[in-house]
Image: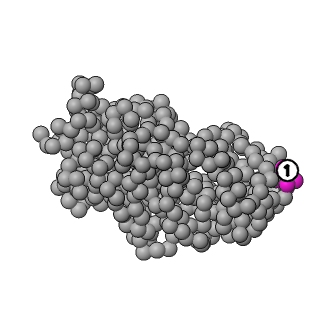
Amino acid sequence: MSERRFSRRRALATGLSGVGVALAGCLAEEDDGNGNGSGNGGNGETTGTTDDDAPTVGILENRTGNLALEGTSKHQASLLAIEEINENGGVLGEEVEVFDPDPRSDNQRYTELTQEAIRDEEVDALWAAYSSAARETIRPLINQHEQLYFYTTQYEGGVCDKTTFPVGATARQQLGAVVPYLIEEYGERIYIIAADYNFGQLSGEWVNILAEEEGAEIVGEEYIPLESSSFSSTINNIQGEDPDFIMSMLVGGNHAAFYQERAANDLDIPIGSSTTMAQGYEHLRLDPPALTDMYVGVNYMQELQTDASQEFVDAFYEKFPDAEYINQEAQNNYFSVYMWKEAVERAGTFDQEAVIEELESGIEVDAPEGPIELDPATHHMTHHMRVAHADENHEITFDGEQYIEPTFLHDAGCDLTVESEQTQYEPSDVYE
């Protein structure tokens, strides 16, 4: 048997499940152009058998259900990275196999598949979940089994967890790029609209904190249920307050109706966001001028005109010619697969404890967004943050580039190289 079969985690998994071989998809199978290899029949179910000694990664990203729009691109970018790695000799000379059933945007199914990935497939690393709710559904299992886990969605921030690496941009990084920019460009009166769940509420807290730091004023604040798709009263309220700009942390297909109603009501107030365009590509899905003067704090969009970005875009669409868009999270999946590879090769083993130790020694990676680095203490990334602007034709330009560290968790005292934690901090834990 190879070295990985004698790891501490395998002994734990064997004691819990008593099984060592299960079904998995394999990248050696022919792909159909939509991220569905013939090993999983194109329906998100696995049918191929994983080599018992081969290194295996879990890629649990939504390709169906209400989060398929965002998750499909993440899944595709992960497969692209693994394919490129395997074509160039694999990891430690071994071809990496993939366990990638479709979670179908269902949190209960996420739990079941995470259990299968850890106990049956014995994955060496796991990429899983789009929403914060899905992440928090599976994180107890991640913690219980000390599973190396990469969470790649831009998110509210605050997860300080020994085996979790939340490598997407945090709210502090995204909003910290766009809120001061808009205050300088348009003024100090801000109206907040956000989704009514933990991400939206915590993002609203961040806008309040940043506004106070910048000497700005919040003139209105609304939290919209995810099922809501009518915004006439919200638009009336905004018009009544006449803010200098709106900060929108709306999410999902229902909330996209706000931007269409905004255009229909000639609401020409600029909007800032941490969620729009870079994830659900509303600037392509909605007709102009719905997103005129939309400003978003992003670390990546496929429109970024750099050599590194164009190389990634070309490779992605060569493999997936019918893909809809490469979202911000897809880039995060892509570079984090390569980051895992580098840590494994530094460690000289797939043993997860050793790989985490190498990650915590500090790793730089040449991502499509530009050269970035992992912050060992917090397991987050220092990102190139930019302000993406959509004009009246939804053409995208970028401004205000900054290299922003994950300062929130530093302020919270998170240092996973010194003390192991499994905590999620909130802004109120740190800032008054």
Which contiguous range is marked in magenta? Answer: 235-241
Q: Is residue 20 toward the left or the right of residue 335 in the image?
A: left
Q: Quadrant of the N terminus?
A: top left
Q: Is residue 240 magenta?
A: yes
Q: Is residue 298 toward the left or the right of residue 390 in the image?
A: left
Q: In front here: 12 or 17?
A: 12
* Residue at left offset 51%, top offset 63%: 404
User: Is residue 172 depicted above or below 393 in this figure?
Assistant: above
* Residue at left offset 49%, top offset 60%: 405
On the image, the x and y values in percent for residue 113 come to 39, 34
Q: Is residue 430 magenta?
A: no
Q: In front here: 94 or 392?
A: 94
Q: Is residue 237 toward the left or the right of residue 151 in the image?
A: right
On the image, the x and y values in percent for residue 55 come to 23, 46
User: Is residue 330 depicted above or below 10 in this figure?
Assistant: below
Write down the quadrant of residue 99 in the picture: top left
User: Is residue 118 depicted above or below 267 in this figure?
Assistant: above
Q: Main secondary structure of the magenta part?
A: helix
Write down the quadrant of residue 352 in the picture: top left
Give neighbour class at mark 1: few <14, some 14-19, many 20+ (Cα, 10 Å). few
Residue of label 1: 236
